Amino acid sequence: MTYIAKPKLHHPSLVKNKAGYTRRDYEGAVSTLCAGCGHDSISAAIIQACYEIDILPHQVAKLSGIGCSSKSPTYFVGASHGFNTVHGRMPSVLTGANLANKDLMYMGVSGDGDSASIGFGQFAHSMRRGVNMTYIVMNNGVYGLTKGQFSATADKGSISKKGAANSDEAIDMVSVAIMMGATFVGRSFSGDKQQLVPLIKAAMMHKGAAFLDVISPCVAFNNHAGSTKSYDYVREHNEALNRIDVIEGREEITTEYAPGTTTMVQQHDGSILRLNKLGEDYDPSDKIAAMTRIQEGLRSGEVVTGLLYVDPTPKDLHHHLNTVDVPLNALNTPDLCPGTAALDRINASLR
Amino acid sequence: MPQAIAAVNDFVVKFANVNGSGSASANELFARSILRMGVPVSPRNIFPSNIQGLPTWYEVRVTEKGYLGRRGGVDMMVAMNPQTWAADVKEITPGGYLFYDSTKPMPSSAFRDDITVIGVPLTAITNATYSDARQRQLFKNIIYVGALSILLGIDDKEIQKLFSEQFKGKEKLIDSNVKALQLGRDWVTQHIEPDVVRLKVRKADNVGDRIFVEGNNAAALGAVYGGATVCAWYPITPSSSLAEAFQAHCKKLRHDKETGKAKYAIVQAEDELASIGMVIGAAWNGARAFTSTSGPGISLMTEFIGLASFAEVPAVIVNVQRGGPSTGMPTRTQQSDLLSCAYASNGDTKHVLLFPEDPKECFDFTADALDLADRLQTPVFVMTDLDIGMNHRLCKPFQWDENRSLDRGKVMTAEELEAGKNFGRYLDVDGDGIPFRTYPGTHPTKGSYFTRGTTKDEYARYSEEGPVYVRNMERLQKKFLTAAKIAPQPVRYSSPKPTAYGVIYLGSTSPAMAEALDQLEADGNHVNALRVRSFPLSQAVEDFIHEHDKVFIVEQNRDAQFRSLVMNEFTLDARKLVPVLHYDGTPITARFIAADIAKKIAQFKVVPFEKAAS
């Protein structure tokens, strides 16, 4: 980490996005994570994604649990409200926040300890409910803040820094997310910005439960030989199925692509995801095929990355609850309090 | 045989039934018909944690004087459950009455010779009239209500009116119920001497405009009026009916007339941790939110309650208390979560508790709790219990001030931020310990902050520096003192004569206490009373204690938890505070309170205070 405070003044020539903000307006405080931590790359990717989709910084709400990953919301989009909740319980707090105001964009940041161990239940149930959010797990397979214990996503047989082998089966977060009903599921690598930034953008534009499992090596405790979450291992075994470009609905598609190399998926908000296929023919809208491909990757030791599953027309929790168009937190006394005449009728019915 | 008990509008009838047999609605019909005759009743369900088959009881106290606490003792037992027959018969007060189904002959050893036995062949009458099994089961219940209406002098027109209201538009159902009722009435008229039963209901005018409602239903309505838009909950006895009632009220009162869309969101969460998490998330984001639960749910919520308290996020938790510890007595009542709620969570935490006495206050306090939580930016507990929550209780009608609006507390707006008003999320600007907050999304460049459970300075910046931490903790203490001033204040009842004795009580003890005070007064034991309605304790509580030599603290738990709260919060001689404790899971009775206090006063008169108190 560095102790140098970030200067507040920006260079006048910085390019502004359509919302009138520079990329630096989406930054946060200086990171206190270790130099080289994958999480910082993910924070940078989030900053880039927010800048590129032209969102107003204060229209993002950042929520996290406890752990290294959960510290990171301090390091991006400083002009938005953040909530560092309790260990493993970010999903419920995010769900409540989303119920209160459906108009903000919810970014849930969590780690593998936070979401696969103590908060596994909340992770699963928030997917089931279709909470409109972008849920990012910064997955390093290890407990960093408590100095190197295995987490529940550590692969069976992988070796800890101290040399112990993990005997427990790993929880594959993307498989669980798909099974639990997430409508946008991707996996990426903190070291692959080109793949990661568009995935985050697409997830943020997705109007439903979007989940991203981002392998993010822990340079302090899980970056050694024998680890399956190290930079070297992931680079070597990364099996990218696709890279996507996010095209906002209003943009005209001009570039021509050779037939068979791209697939277009139009999301409900009008945005188009252009999938650049890498090698194999893969249809991310087919849930069963997605599950099969992920399981094949697990068997062969590949880290299958890319947009793995997407339902382009998701229905979110507010749809299920049939809530009014105005955010619930904007309703006031006349909307909410039925008044004395109604109360008199209720009293009369109770005699 | 002792003389048969004779009483008009002042007796207890207990129904012993089998759970799931449809008896509940018949028994409620019985209670309501007496109420319609202008005579107050106080019914109580005594039920098992079971869906079908286990014993269940329904106790109706008929009380012209309007004593709504449980009285104790049974003047008439309606014994419909062979499984509990022996214990039920044994429970009848000597001189009382046993009403039973005499279809099958019973040996004389099954009865007692100090009670009046009334046998009605309910099964035989039912089977002769109905062939369908379910009809037989349901109408048998109505037939016994018919039989009892003749024996006790209940006006059958009132019962018929209740049928018409209940089955409005379903004429067939009204007719068949009236027919069953008449079957019971006819049989008794033809076979039993009039006035064998000397317990009578006589028309009176003592109900007035009062309403008859369950506390859970009332609290749910209070949440609607208090502007709650988010309810997250997890099913747990005895609180489940509260969230369900909220849903029912919202369906009627909270849908947009044009679009039909909901102005509320209710989520049945995966557990209590998630439900309180959702409440905190919603309240952080500016919605009014609540959850309802019971003791074990509070245990699970404790970590989150600490977060909400320390990060200063509003939350309303209605705790419908049941018997603890652990799973305890899920279908019995207690006031045994006082300490676990008052001091929930690790570290130095203290929370605001409200103690409603009846459904009316469940309504008031739940609405008030939503205001208080926003004003104080902290969790507020509404401490009701099974006795209030799941029983119909006669109480004052709900009232609402048409001019009342939701008090959202100190929320800084975009305009204020734009105008350059200084915003420090944890900055005490006016000395009451309560800072300003902003809702997420308020302003593009000003007013954002990071909410966390770690320590922070006045501007929400993470800090573990000692002085910063201490400043924050002292401000929270100041906020707690502010809470003591703005929460519902105690209500005092003074004895007509000066006295050295006082009594402090709270919550569902209230109706039994009111009656006990009358009994004590009648016996020459003068006692002043203070009903505490909130924690932190108001200065009035300490003043009341100083005013008396001895203060009884009446509560429904083993460990004198409320007394502990009093001792913790004030500096006073603990020997002054005499516990009066009832905790067997049944609602506390006036007989118990009056006898215990009278006994203790008698001891104080003959031995030094210190010895008697120990």
Image (cartoon, rainbow, N blue to C red):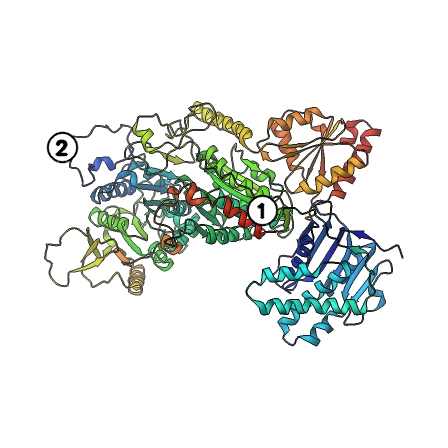
The spot of residue B543 in percent (x, y) is: 65, 25
Drawn side of residue B161 relative to residue A123, left or right: right
Tell me which amino acid carries mark 2: Ser
Tell me which amino acid carries mark 1: Val
| Residue found at x 15% / y 30% | A12
Q: CA distance from mark 2 to mark 1?
A: 62 Å
**Which residue was labeled with disc 1?**
B320
Disc 2 chain ID: A
Q: Is residue A233 visible?
A: no
Drawn side of residue A275 relative to residue A146, left or right: left
For the residue labelled by badge 1, is the local secondary structure a helix, a strand or a loop?
A: strand
For the residue labelled by badge 2, is the local secondary structure a helix, a strand or a loop?
A: loop
Q: Quadrant of the N terminus of chain B?
A: bottom right
| Residue found at x 52% / y 32% | B348
Hey, which quadrant is residue A307 in on the image? bottom left
**Relative to A80, residue B323 above or below:** below
